[in-house]
């Protein structure tokens, strides 16, 4: 596989990840996360002896920078590059995710509790809750609105940070894209959407096809900007199994998802599926759709790496599996070292494995000491 349409240099980090996606061995196991929350970045820098205040203290927040970028007063991604690169170096990571930016449709100000809220790119009314967002009013409150949804124009999407990271850093750059199931479920009440898949299967299938075509155009935009890999964020399951019947997934959503996979691979770029939860019963479909790999392999949901490696290790690149429910938030340093080495012992043989937490995002709520222990143990494997 090539590394994207802009042909950035093939560094050691990029070569390791590409080989893993092709289920091949490399000089060492690639490792990395799709994101690291800024507060954790600061603590990690302090832990390894950097002056975090000097590196991070005078930078704009990402949202402030986006505001400046819209006014032509800031380079896109400036803050994230300045904050994140020293952490990637300290943890000896090979990859990160730089995602397309989705600017809000309308800024609304603050609510009675002082929280910022706005109409997001998709048309949902959202509010800031800590480090995350919560939907207050979905874009589509009933099935008729969902079936008539007007897709946003792609020209408003910000892809410049992908290009900068691809051209100015040695890291393998993934871009994360929503899948049809997750994206449509986020435009309405999720529980209502699950009901729609039962009550209106043919209509939702047609909508999933349209959604997939729009997402293919988004993938094209990311690849042209320099993305070397695509991750489809498509949470198909919860801890006990798939959100809807496997047969419904196969009929309604997997045709569109498979087309997205083929679209991406025709452009010489590997494509992984991210799904939390217990997706064991759907792994044959992941293979059949042609995905190069799977991320999460959530151990607390019953995804046992030893079993998945034995059955799918020659057909899928496996990424993740380090526990984020107990181990990284609360585990001891020794527990983390032991779990890291065991994960690598199982996943590493014959290649086709990328070391990562099962979340793919390192949380600011976790001790920096635990994260550092995890990555230092992996580097010394």
Image (cartoon, rainbow, N blue to C red):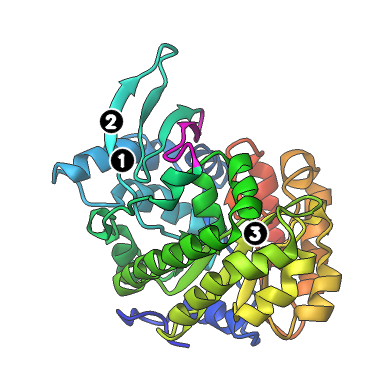
Q: Is residue 296 above or below residue 185?
A: below
Crowding near pointer 3: few (<14 within 10 Å), some, many (20+)? many
Q: Is residue 13 visible?
A: no
Depth order, front residue of 298/275: 275
Q: Residue at x 59, y 85 (%)?
A: 22
Q: CA distance from mark 3 to mark 1?
A: 26 Å
Depth order, front residue of 140/243: 140
Q: Residue at x 77, y 58 (%)?
A: 278
Q: Is residue 3 left or right of residue 270?
A: left
Q: In the rendered structure, are the residues bearing label 2 and label 3 in contact, judged by CB atoms less than 8 Å apart?
A: no
Q: Residue at x 67, y 79 (%)?
A: 287
Q: In what element is the residue under mark 2?
A: strand
Depth order, front residue of 49/362: 362
Give the percent coordinates (x, y) of residue 71: 14, 41
Asked whether 140 falls inside the magenta stretch, the response is yes
Q: Badge 1 is on which residue? A: 104
Marks 3 and 1, the one that precedes in the sequence: 1
Q: CA distance from mark 2 to mark 3?
A: 31 Å
Query: Which label is found at residue 107?
Result: 2
Q: In the rendered structure, are the residues bearing label 2 and label 1 in contact, judged by CB atoms less than 8 Å apart?
A: yes
Marks 2 and 3, the one that precedes in the sequence: 2
Asked whether 208 falls inside the magenta stretch, the response is no
Give the percent coordinates (x, y) of residue 131: 50, 34
Q: In what element is the residue under mark 3?
A: strand
Q: Is residue 323 visible?
A: yes
Q: Is residue 46 above or below residue 150?
A: above
Q: Which residues are magenta?
A: 130-142
Give the percent coordinates (x, y) of residue 101: 34, 52
Query: Which label is found at residue 275?
Result: 3
Q: Is residue 47 above or below residue 243?
A: above
Q: CA distance from mark 2 to mark 1?
A: 7 Å
Q: Determine which quarter of the picture holds residue 98.
A: bottom left
């Amino acid at each position: 596989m090539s590394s994207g349409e802009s042909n950035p240099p093939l560094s050691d980090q990029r070569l390791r990840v590409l080989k893993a996606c092709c289920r091949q061995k490399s000089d060492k196991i690639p490792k990395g996360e799709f994101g690291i929350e800024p507060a954790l970045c600061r603590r990690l820098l302090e832990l390894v002896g950097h002056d975090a205040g000097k590196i991070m203290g005078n930078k704009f927040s990402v949202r402030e920078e986006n505001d400046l970028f819209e006014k032509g007063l800031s380079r896109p991604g400036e803050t994230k590059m300045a904050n994140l690169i020293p952490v990637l170096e300290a943890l000896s990571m090979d990859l990160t995710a730089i995602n397309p930016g989705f600017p809000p449709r309308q800024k609304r100000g603050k609510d009675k509790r002082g929280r910022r809220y706005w109409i997001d790119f998709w048309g949902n009314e959202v509010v800031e809750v800590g480090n995350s967002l919560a939907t207050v009013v979905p874009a589509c409150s009933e099935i008729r609105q969902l079936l008539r949804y007007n897709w946003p124009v792609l020209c408003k999407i910000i892809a410049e940070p992908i290009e900068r990271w691809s051209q100015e850093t040695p890291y393998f750059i993934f871009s994360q894209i929503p899948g049809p199931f997750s994206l449509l479920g986020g435009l309405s009440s999720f529980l209502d959407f699950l009901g729609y898949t039962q009550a209106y299967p043919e209509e939702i299938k047609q909508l999933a096809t349209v959604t997939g075509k729009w997402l293919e155009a988004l993938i094209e935009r990311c690849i042209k900007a320099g993305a070397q890999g695509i991750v489809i964020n498509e949470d198909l399951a919860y801890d006990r199994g798939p959100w809807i019947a496997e047969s419904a997934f196969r009929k309604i959503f997997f045709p569109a998802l498979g087309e997205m996979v083929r679209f991406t691979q025709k452009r010489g770029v590997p494509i992984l599926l991210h799904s939390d939860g217990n997706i064991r019963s759907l792994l044959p479909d992941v293979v059949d759709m042609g995905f190069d790999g799977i991320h999460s392999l959530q151990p607390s949901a019953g995804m046992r790496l030893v079993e998945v490696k034995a059955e799918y290790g020659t057909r899928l690149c496996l990424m993740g599996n380090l526990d984020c429910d107990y181990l990284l938030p609360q585990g001891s340093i020794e527990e983390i070292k032991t779990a890291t080495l065991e994960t690598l012992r199982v996943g590493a043989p014959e290649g086709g494995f990328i070391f990562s937490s099962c979340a793919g995002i390192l949380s600011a709520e976790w001790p920096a000491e635990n994260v550092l222990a995890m990555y230092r143990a992996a580097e010394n494997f």
